[in-house]
Amino acid sequence: MLLQPKLLEQILSLEDNRLLAYLKSCSAMGQLPYNLWFRKCFAGCLPESSLQRVWDKVISGSCKILVFVAVEILLTFKMKLMALTSAEKIERFLENIPQDNTDAIVSKAIELWHKHCGTPAHSV
Protein backbone atom coordinates (compact mmCIF):
# COMPACT_ATOMS: atom_id res chain seq x y z
CA MET A 1 0.00 0.00 0.00
CA LEU A 2 2.91 2.38 0.59
CA LEU A 3 3.67 2.71 -3.11
CA GLN A 4 0.15 3.71 -4.15
CA PRO A 5 0.24 7.29 -2.78
CA LYS A 6 3.61 7.85 -4.48
CA LEU A 7 2.34 6.44 -7.78
CA LEU A 8 -0.83 8.52 -7.46
CA GLU A 9 1.31 11.63 -7.05
CA GLN A 10 3.47 10.69 -10.07
CA ILE A 11 0.47 10.08 -12.33
CA LEU A 12 -1.32 13.21 -11.13
CA SER A 13 1.82 15.27 -11.83
CA LEU A 14 1.73 14.04 -15.43
CA GLU A 15 -2.02 14.52 -15.86
CA ASP A 16 -2.63 17.78 -13.98
CA ASN A 17 0.33 19.31 -12.22
CA ARG A 18 -1.70 22.39 -11.27
CA LEU A 19 -4.18 20.28 -9.31
CA LEU A 20 -1.33 18.41 -7.62
CA ALA A 21 0.32 21.72 -6.66
CA TYR A 22 -2.97 22.94 -5.17
CA LEU A 23 -3.50 19.75 -3.16
CA LYS A 24 0.07 20.01 -1.86
CA SER A 25 -0.32 23.72 -1.04
CA CYS A 26 -3.21 23.00 1.31
CA SER A 27 -1.55 19.84 2.70
CA ALA A 28 -4.29 17.60 1.30
CA MET A 29 -2.03 14.97 -0.30
CA GLY A 30 -1.35 13.42 3.11
CA GLN A 31 -5.04 13.42 4.00
CA LEU A 32 -6.59 11.85 0.93
CA PRO A 33 -8.80 8.85 1.82
CA TYR A 34 -6.08 6.30 1.00
CA ASN A 35 -7.58 3.66 3.33
CA LEU A 36 -10.97 3.86 1.61
CA TRP A 37 -9.37 3.87 -1.82
CA PHE A 38 -6.52 1.36 -1.52
CA ARG A 39 -7.23 -0.91 1.45
CA LYS A 40 -10.97 -1.15 0.86
CA CYS A 41 -10.58 -1.02 -2.94
CA PHE A 42 -13.23 1.75 -3.15
CA ALA A 43 -15.89 -0.28 -1.28
CA GLY A 44 -18.13 2.30 0.33
CA CYS A 45 -16.98 4.92 -2.16
CA LEU A 46 -18.27 3.65 -5.50
CA PRO A 47 -21.65 2.02 -6.21
CA GLU A 48 -21.72 -1.70 -6.94
CA SER A 49 -21.93 -1.36 -10.74
CA SER A 50 -18.74 0.70 -10.81
CA LEU A 51 -17.02 -1.42 -8.15
CA GLN A 52 -17.43 -4.59 -10.18
CA ARG A 53 -15.44 -3.16 -13.06
CA VAL A 54 -12.64 -2.01 -10.75
CA TRP A 55 -12.54 -5.26 -8.79
CA ASP A 56 -12.44 -7.25 -12.05
CA LYS A 57 -9.09 -5.61 -12.78
CA VAL A 58 -7.82 -6.09 -9.21
CA ILE A 59 -8.77 -9.78 -9.17
CA SER A 60 -7.01 -10.32 -12.50
CA GLY A 61 -3.81 -8.94 -10.97
CA SER A 62 -3.95 -5.31 -12.07
CA CYS A 63 -3.91 -3.64 -8.65
CA LYS A 64 -2.55 -0.39 -10.12
CA ILE A 65 -6.05 0.32 -11.44
CA LEU A 66 -6.87 1.54 -7.92
CA VAL A 67 -4.38 4.38 -8.35
CA PHE A 68 -5.89 5.37 -11.68
CA VAL A 69 -9.41 5.40 -10.24
CA ALA A 70 -8.16 7.69 -7.46
CA VAL A 71 -6.44 9.97 -10.00
CA GLU A 72 -9.57 10.09 -12.15
CA ILE A 73 -11.71 10.98 -9.13
CA LEU A 74 -9.34 13.89 -8.44
CA LEU A 75 -9.40 14.98 -12.09
CA THR A 76 -13.18 14.69 -12.37
CA PHE A 77 -13.79 16.82 -9.30
CA LYS A 78 -10.89 19.23 -9.88
CA MET A 79 -13.00 22.40 -9.88
CA LYS A 80 -14.84 21.37 -6.72
CA LEU A 81 -11.60 20.38 -4.97
CA MET A 82 -9.86 23.62 -5.90
CA ALA A 83 -12.79 25.56 -4.44
CA LEU A 84 -12.34 23.84 -1.07
CA THR A 85 -9.98 25.66 1.26
CA SER A 86 -8.69 23.01 3.64
CA ALA A 87 -7.34 19.47 3.62
CA GLU A 88 -10.17 18.43 5.95
CA LYS A 89 -12.86 19.72 3.58
CA ILE A 90 -11.17 18.00 0.63
CA GLU A 91 -10.94 14.72 2.54
CA ARG A 92 -14.59 14.94 3.62
CA PHE A 93 -15.71 15.58 0.04
CA LEU A 94 -13.62 12.70 -1.36
CA GLU A 95 -14.99 10.28 1.23
CA ASN A 96 -18.50 11.01 -0.06
CA ILE A 97 -18.18 11.71 -3.77
CA PRO A 98 -21.36 12.20 -5.81
CA GLN A 99 -22.54 8.84 -7.15
CA ASP A 100 -24.12 10.02 -10.40
CA ASN A 101 -21.13 9.72 -12.75
CA THR A 102 -18.99 6.99 -11.21
CA ASP A 103 -19.34 4.69 -14.25
CA ALA A 104 -17.79 7.45 -16.39
CA ILE A 105 -15.03 7.92 -13.80
CA VAL A 106 -14.20 4.20 -13.92
CA SER A 107 -14.22 4.19 -17.75
CA LYS A 108 -11.84 7.16 -17.83
CA ALA A 109 -9.66 5.52 -15.16
CA ILE A 110 -9.36 2.38 -17.30
CA GLU A 111 -8.37 4.54 -20.30
CA LEU A 112 -5.78 6.32 -18.16
CA TRP A 113 -4.47 2.98 -16.90
CA HIS A 114 -4.05 1.74 -20.49
CA LYS A 115 -2.32 5.01 -21.43
CA HIS A 116 0.25 4.73 -18.64
CA CYS A 117 0.59 0.95 -18.29
CA GLY A 118 -0.16 -0.31 -21.79
CA THR A 119 -2.61 -3.08 -22.58
CA PRO A 120 -1.97 -6.08 -20.32
CA ALA A 121 -1.53 -9.40 -22.14
CA HIS A 122 -4.48 -11.02 -20.37
CA SER A 123 -6.92 -8.44 -21.75
CA VAL A 124 -5.98 -8.93 -25.41
Image: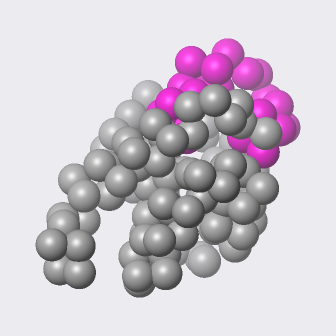
Task: Please tell me whether residue 79 is drawn above or below residue 62 in the rendered image.
Answer: above
**Toward the viewer: 38 or 104?**
104
Residue at x-position 25% and y-position 65%: 117
Query: Seen in the image, is 101 located left or right of residue 65?
Result: right
Task: Examine the structure image and report whether residue 117 is included in the region drawn in magenta.
Answer: no
The percent position of residue 37, horizontal first and vertical second, equals 66, 60
**Toward the viewer: 99 or 19?**
99
Query: Seen in the image, is 72 located left or right of residue 97?
Result: left
Task: Please tell me whether residue 101 is drawn above or below residue 1 in the rendered image.
Answer: above
**Toward the viewer: 116 or 43?**
43
Task: Please tell me whether residue 91 is drawn above or below residue 114 in the rendered image.
Answer: above
Residue at x-position 56% and y-position 63%: 52
> From the image, which quarter does the C terminus lie in?
bottom left
**Toward the viewer: 92 or 40?**
40
The percent position of residue 111, horizontal first and vertical second, equals 29, 49
The percent position of residue 69, horizontal first and vertical second, equals 50, 52
- Magenta portion: prevailing SS class: helix
> Quadrant of residue 60 in the image?
bottom left
Residue at x-position 72% and y-position 62%: 43
The percent position of residue 96, horizontal first and vertical second, equals 79, 39
The answer to whether one can see residue 27 in this image is: no
The answer to whether one can see residue 76 in this image is: yes
Q: Which residues are magenta?
A: 73-95
**Total tally of numbered discs in the picture:** 0
Residue at x-position 67% and y-position 50%: 46
Q: How is the image coloured?
A: one colour
> From the image, which quarter does the N terminus lie in?
bottom right
Q: Residue furthest front?
A: 49
